[in-house]
């Protein structure tokens, strides 16, 4: 089960969207499957015309009781089962919603002073949680570490209802393209979004060089625009970088820049520099072994083949083609197991 956290300030607008037709008329039979109050579930049952203004006012009452309204004040969480999972009933989705809010601490089970919330279902495979970030006992809601706690709650309900198990979040996965990015790439006839293309180009460049200067030159030779970020305390120190695709611009004609860490956590400049430093140390140790050592330094051509193979395997994994990645890895294992040729 996949959950996503979106923060905002307009609970009324969120409810109108959830009860509306959706961007592609995908919202069918929207109804509340669970809420902080059972009366709300009855008022918004399937087939009944919900009074959204009244529901919005009820959700906002704890916010009005605070001395100062927080911003963001609305916690929105879509929850979706994986393709191939069985369809959950309304009662099961209600339990899923309660478990998520319990583990995130927004509305713990048995806590009458928790946040007010509703769980709206308008499709077979997902629901939306709408929570106002003020407790009913007059205190502000705490959302620290909510994303990690959401992941733990998802794994709990996966085991409870026999759903596909998702791995624990290690916060190293690259960011997925947004819906807007995917739709624009489709309109422009692109096989991948600019973010995905830049991620692939940056990774290939990083694997083929050993320092920042060569890294920038490799990107520029691939027609990628590079912008370095310098330290405010030491103007000579480079602390980060951004890249842009020259064919991808805003409606105003400006380039769209992506920071290295926004492409993938492993592509931030500090992590790349550690990789380059470790690689240089490894080459130094290999040279120190001498010509009679069993480990011989790789030729540039062989090194490039290994780097290209590694980049290909990583790309297959990110695109969900695990089978292709395993096949590519098996080929590399076979090649590595072959005895070296005699000089």
Image (cartoon, rainbow, N blue to C red):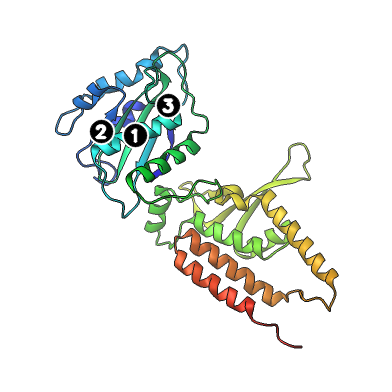
Label 2: element kind? strand
Q: Earlier in the sequence, mark 1 or mark 3?
A: 1
Label 3: element kind? loop
Give the residue pinned by disc 3: 106
Would you call the spot at circle 2 few (<14 residues within 10 Å), some (14-19), or many (20 or more)? many
Q: Quadrant of residue 155?
A: top left
- x and y, in percent, of residue 204 in the image: 61, 64
- x and y, in percent, of residue 305 in the image: 63, 74
Q: Is residue 201 left or right of residue 300?
A: left
Would you call the spot at circle 3 few (<14 residues within 10 Å), some (14-19), or many (20 or more)? many
Q: Count the marks: how many?
A: 3
Give the residue pinned by disc 2: 33
Q: Is residue 170 left or right of residue 287?
A: left
Q: Earlier in the sequence, mark 2 or mark 3?
A: 2
Q: Residue drawn 24% across and 37% down?
A: 90
Q: Nearer the viewer, residue 340 or 197?
A: 340
Label 1: element kind? helix
Q: CA distance from mark 1 to mark 3?
A: 11 Å
- x and y, in percent, of residue 121 in the image: 26, 38
Q: Quadrant of residue 54?
A: top left
- Look at the image and tell me whether residue 220 can be seen: no
Q: Earlier in the sequence, mark 1 or mark 2?
A: 2
Q: Nearer the viewer, residue 243 or 329?
A: 329
Q: CA distance from mark 1 to mark 2?
A: 9 Å
Q: Is residue 307 left or right of residue 150?
A: right
Would you call the spot at circle 1 few (<14 residues within 10 Å), some (14-19), or many (20 or more)? many
Q: Is residue 143 above or below residue 337?
A: above
Q: Residue drawn 27% across and 41% down?
A: 22
Q: Is residue 181 above or below residue 51?
A: below
State the mark number for residue 97. Answer: 1
């Amino acid at each position: 089960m996949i959950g996503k956290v979106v923060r905002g300030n307009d609970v009324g607008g969120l409810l109108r969207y959830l009860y509306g037709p959706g961007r592609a008329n995908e919202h069918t039979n929207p109804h509340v499957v669970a809420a902080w109050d059972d009366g709300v579930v009855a008022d918004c049952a399937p087939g009944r015309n919900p009074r959204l203004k009244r529901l919005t006012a009820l959700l906002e009452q704890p916010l009005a009781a605070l001395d100062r309204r927080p911003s963001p004040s609305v916690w929105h969480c879509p929850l979706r089962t994986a393709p191939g999972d069985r369809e959950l009933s309304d009662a099961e989705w209600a339990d899923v919603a309660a478990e998520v809010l319990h583990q995130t601490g927004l509305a713990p089970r048995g806590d009458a002073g928790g946040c007010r919330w509703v769980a709206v279902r308008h499709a077979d495979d997902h629901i939306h949680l709408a929570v106002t970030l003020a407790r009913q006992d007059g205190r502000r809601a705490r959302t620290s570490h909510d994303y990690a706690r959401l992941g733990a709650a998802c794994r709990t309900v996966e085991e409870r209802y026999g759903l596909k198990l998702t791995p624990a979040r290690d916060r190293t996965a690259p960011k997925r393209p947004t819906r807007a990015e995917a739709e624009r790439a489709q309109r422009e006839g692109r096989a991948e979004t600019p973010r995905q293309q830049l991620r692939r180009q940056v990774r290939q460049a990083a694997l083929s060089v050993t320092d920042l200067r060569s890294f920038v030159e490799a990107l520029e030779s691939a027609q990628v625009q590079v912008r370095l970020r310098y330290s405010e305390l030491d103007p000579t120190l480079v602390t980060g970088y951004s890249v842009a695709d020259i064919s991808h611009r805003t409606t105003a004609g400006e380039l769209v820049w992506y920071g290295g860490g926004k492409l993938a956590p492993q592509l931030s400049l500090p992590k790349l520099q550690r990789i380059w430093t470790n690689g240089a140390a490894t080459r130094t140790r290999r040279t120190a072994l001498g010509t009679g050592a069993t480990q011989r330094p790789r030729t540039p051509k062989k090194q490039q083949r290994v780097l290209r193979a590694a980049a290909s395997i990583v790309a297959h994994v990110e695109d969900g083609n695990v089978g292709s990645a395993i096949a590519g890895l098996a080929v590399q294992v076979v090649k590595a197991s072959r005895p070296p040729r005699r000089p």
